Structure formats: C-alpha cells, structure tokens
C-alpha cells in the first residue's frame, strides 16, 4: 500500500507541469465558456429591457403630445363664450397657458376672411397694427402679399411675438397641409395637427395644433352643424415635448429619433437626440422601432432607438469577468482607466467653464464699450439713436409724453481755441458727467450727440423743463472759467426742450427737429437759458 502511494507521488512530481498545464487549461476553458454563456444571457436580458424602455418612452411621448394638444383644446374652449376676442384677453390667457405648458412655443388667433371682406378687414386691423396685411410665404419663405383666393386664414394675434420675423397677417391656409388640417378641425370639431415651416423658424419642421372656435351665439346643440370661422393655433416645441416625456435616464446612452412615416426619406426625421456618450459606437443591429398610437389621423410617427456600446456596457455586470480567470484584472484595469477618463473630463469641464466665463465677461465689456462714447463716458450716438427709436415706439403704444433735451456748450469753440484741446476734452468730460448725474431715473438717458452737443431722452416726462433747468444750473455751478464767453465768464449751456405725445406713423426725427429749433431760439436770445416747445404736432 505504501509503495503504491509513493509511486503515485513520484508520478505527480514527474508530471507536475503537465498536470498544472492541464488544470490551468481546463480552468481557463471552463471559466471562458462560463463567462461567454453568462455574457450571452446577460445580453438577452439587456435587449429585452431596452425594448421595454423604448416602448414605455414611446407611450410617454404620446401622452406628453396628447397633453399639449389637450392644453390647446382647453385654451380654445375658454374663448367659446366670447363674441369678440381682443388682444389683451388673448395675451393674458396665452401667458397662463405658456406658463403651465412649456411645450407650447407660441399661440395664435386665426380668423377666416372671405376675399370680398379682405380690404375691409385689413383696413380695420391696420387701425390697431399699421403693418397688418394678409400675407403668404413665397417659395423662398419670404413674406409677400397673399394671392387672390376665395378664403384666407390670416393670423391676427400671436403670443409671444416672434423676435425674428412677425407672422401676424400670415395666411396659414396658403400651405396645403395646414389648410387640410384647418378643414379637418372644422369637420371633426376637435383639435387637429400638421407639420409646416415658417420664416420665423427657418430650417425647422414645426408641429402645429389647430383648434376650432365657436362664438357665444352658437349653442352646444348647434356645434355639430356649425362651421367655425375662427381657430386657435399652437406652435408645439417637439424638443420640449420629448424632454418632458423622458421618464428616466435609462435611455441616456441611446440614440433616439422621431420620424414621420408619411414623409419622403429626406424629410422623415422630425427630432434627433444623440446618445449622451457621443464617442460610443452605435449598435445599429439592435435598433428598435415603435410606432406612436394613431389617435390623431394626421400623425403617423415612430420612435427609432439605437443603443450605444456604452448603454450595453453600463448594464453589464461583472459576473462573467469574475468567473473568468482574467476577468478581475480586466475589471480593475477598466475601472482605473474609467477613473482616469473621468478625472480628465472634470479637468476639461473646469477649463471650459473658466473660458466660458472669461468670454462672457469680455462680451459684456464689449457691449458696454460699443454703447459708450470713448471721450466722455456717456452713451454714444449709435446707442442714443437705438434708444430714441425704442422709447418713441413705446410712447406711441402707451400714448404717453416723451421729452427730448438738446444741449449745446456756449462758445465752446472759443474755449477750445484759447485753452487748448486738452482742456476742451476735460471740459467735455466734466459737462457730460454732470449732466448724467443730474438724471434721477434709470430710463433717462444722456448721450453725446456730437462735438459739444449732448442730448437727453426723458420717457413719460411732462416736466422736462424742470430737468433742463436743473442741468443748466448744475453746469453753471461748476464754475469752469471761460473768459472768452460773452454770456458769462464761466462755461454755460443752452438747452432746447421738446415734449411730444407721438402719433402712429410719426418719426422720431420730429422731436429732434423741434428740440433743435428750441435750442436755436435759446442761442439767438442770449444763451445760457432753456427754451421749451410743447406738443408741436397738435
């Protein structure tokens, strides 16, 4: 027995390398096969979870879209009891809807206009908005006068007003797709949707919701037989709808597209959200396509989802690697590598934030320099012209008084010639600083108009002569010596004041001309005084 045992021991010692190699090979093979099998099972579970998440995301997207359309339906229903819709009521209610429904980018009121009524309606609306005309979009997306046709569907009001190009007056019925949606909304008595494009939002497909309106004279029993002549339109932000529909971060590393099944290939894509890990390759072979519910006849969309490698990688646990002999080493290396990448990412983020802040500060300083006169430090002529146009338009809307003060330094040429340009520049700086300090309201603006001339804009001010006199005394009290002035032995100013309630269609240059005339009167009647012209247009 003992001899047999020793024999077995000698055999093990003799063939230890072969045994170790065999055991190692079998262990590696078994570990690799087990890891491969577990990996495949894990992949199937991830794909199943992915398809479930895509289906849930599709339903969530549909619910958010339906919520936005229902918001338009409720909004339009609130006006069905009104016989006439004015902009104030429209804007107040629109603001509430936009505050609660972020996916609605713009609301508009549309009214059907027959060709026989076109001129009358345009004339009536121009009383409120002088620029109102019934327009249409040309093939280049330019706004042109609408062609003659039996009916028009122009936009009367919008909220908010687009900053790029106004769409008030645009006949949205000139677009066949929108006209079809209008007719469908009128026939079905409920909200309809369509896709279109507008000049204010170039290179974008826009989702429009259209709801019919019924005035107070139409009873509930008559709605089924009545054809609405007015509509509410909502411009829906598809990106906002999508973002609001995201129920979790499960699809963060998934490339998502919303496509229009009714469109041709180049125009199919409605919205595209890239995977958050843009450097990760997409697994095109695992793409999932889910159609949205077809409750809306005009919407035939699908959600196309393609997972990235990072999406799959994040959902893979380490069991296959732990089972495999080299799995642990690979995992440690991967974690270390990932930490290094994250550390580099944090460093890059800090650098980007720093550079962004520096750029923002530089831009703000550039804006200030662009508005400021380099010598005096007050507003320059360009900014003055911009603010005068702005305040003039506001005064027209509010029918309020706008006042303008034109200021000229008396005998400044003699001052410059005798005391030198350095002293002249110093005098201009002192006068400008004093005039600006005399103003007490943030809306009041003092600007250098040119040379030794200054201008002051006073919005909603009826006692401008008081401000002008205060400015005159302030400069006089400076006591800047000017022995070559025939008015006084100190620097003085002459001021021309004009107060106007501007009318629609009037030009801001009017107030400058009258203020300049008043300044001329002040100069020829002795200087160092204030001359006022009030409401010269009456």
Image: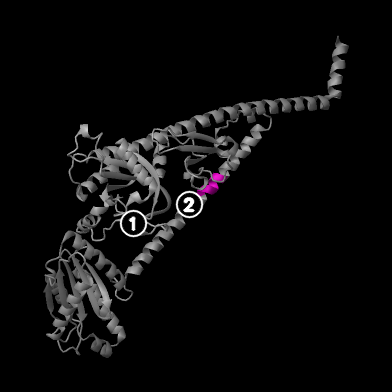
Which contiguous range is marked in magenta? 341-346
Q: At x 18% / y 71%, what residue is drawn?
A: 404
Above or below, comparing residue 243 to residue 421 in the picture: above
Q: Say the numbered circle drawn on residue 350.
A: 2
Q: How many marks?
A: 2
Residue 5 picture quarter: top right
Q: Residue 108, position in %: x, y?
A: 29, 48
Nearest to the observer: residue 10 or residue 192 = 192
Residue 38 picture quarter: top right
Q: Residue 100, position in %: x, y?
A: 29, 41
Above or below, comparing residue 33 to residue 524 in the picture: above
Give the left or right position of residue 496, taking residue 2 as reference: left
The residue that mark 1 highlights is: 147
Q: Residue 202, position in %: x, y?
A: 41, 54
Sequence-wise first label, 2 or 1: 1
Pointer 2: residues within 10 angstroms few (<14), some, or many (20+)? few
Give the left or right position of residue 362, taking residue 252 as reference: left
């Amino acid at each position: 027995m003992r001899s047999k045992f020793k024999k077995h021991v000698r055999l093990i010692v003799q063939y230890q390398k072969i045994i170790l190699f065999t055991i190692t090979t079998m262990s590696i093979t078994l570990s690799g096969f087990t890891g491969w099998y577990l990996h495949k099972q894990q992949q199937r579970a991830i794909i199943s979870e992915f398809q479930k998440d895509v289906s849930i995301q599709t339903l969530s997207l549909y619910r958010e879209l339906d919520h936005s359309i229902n918001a338009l339906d409720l909004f339009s229903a609130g006006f069905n009891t009104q016989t006439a819709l004015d902009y104030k009521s429209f804007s107040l209610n629109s603001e509430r809807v936009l505050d609660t429904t972020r996916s609605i980018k713009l609301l508009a009121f549309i009214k059907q206009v027959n060709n026989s009524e076109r001129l009358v309606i345009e004339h009536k609306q121009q009383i409120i908005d002088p620029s109102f005309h019934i327009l249409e979009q040309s093939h280049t997306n330019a706004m042109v006068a609408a062609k003659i046709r039996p009916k028009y569907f122009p936009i009367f009001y919008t909220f908010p007003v687009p900053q790029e190009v106004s769409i008030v007056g645009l006949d949205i019925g000139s677009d066949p797709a929108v006209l079809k949606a209008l007719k469908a909304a009128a026939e079905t008595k409920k909200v309809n949707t369509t896709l279109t494009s507008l000049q204010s939002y170039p290179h974008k497909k826009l989702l429009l919701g259209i709801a019919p309106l019924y005035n107070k004279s139409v009873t509930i029993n008559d709605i089924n037989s009545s054809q609405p002549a007015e509509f509410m339109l909502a411009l829906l932000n598809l990106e906002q709808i999508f973002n609001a529909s995201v129920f979790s971060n499960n699809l963060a590393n998934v490339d998502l597209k919303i496509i229009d099944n009714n469109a041709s290939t180049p125009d199919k894509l409605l919205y595209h959200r890239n995977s958050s890990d843009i450097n990760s390759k997409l697994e095109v072979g695992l793409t999932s396509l889910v159609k949205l519910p077809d409750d809306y006849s005009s919407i035939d969309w699908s959600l196309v989802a393609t997972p990235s490698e990072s999406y799959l990688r994040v959902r893979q646990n380490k069991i296959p690697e732990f089972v495999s002999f080299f799995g642990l080493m690979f995992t440690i290396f991967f974690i270390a590598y990932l930490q290094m990448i994250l550390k580099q990412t944090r460093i890059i983020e800090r650098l980007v934030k720093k550079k962004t802040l520096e750029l923002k500060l530089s831009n703000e300083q550039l804006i200030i320099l662009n508005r400021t006169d380099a010598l005096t430090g007050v507003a320059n002529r360009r900014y003055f012209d911009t603010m005068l146009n702005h305040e003039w338009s506001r005064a027209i809307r509010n029918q309020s008084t706008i006042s303008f003060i034109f200021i000229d330094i008396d005998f400044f040429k003699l001052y410059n010639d005798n005391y030198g340009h350095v002293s002249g520049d110093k005098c201009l700086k002192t006068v400008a600083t004093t005039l600006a300090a005399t103003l007490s309201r943030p809306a009041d603006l003092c600007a250098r108009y040119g040379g030794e001339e200054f201008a002051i804009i006073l919005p909603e001010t009826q006692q401008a002569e008081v401000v002008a006199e205060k400015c005159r005394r302030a400069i006089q009290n400076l006591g800047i010596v000017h022995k070559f002035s025939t008015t006084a032995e100190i620097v003085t100013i002459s001021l021309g004041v004009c107060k106007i309630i501007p009318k629609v269609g009037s030009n801001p240059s009017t107030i400058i001309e009258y203020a300049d005339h008043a300044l001329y009167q002040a100069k020829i009647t002795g200087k160092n005084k204030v001359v006022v012209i009030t409401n010269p247009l009456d």
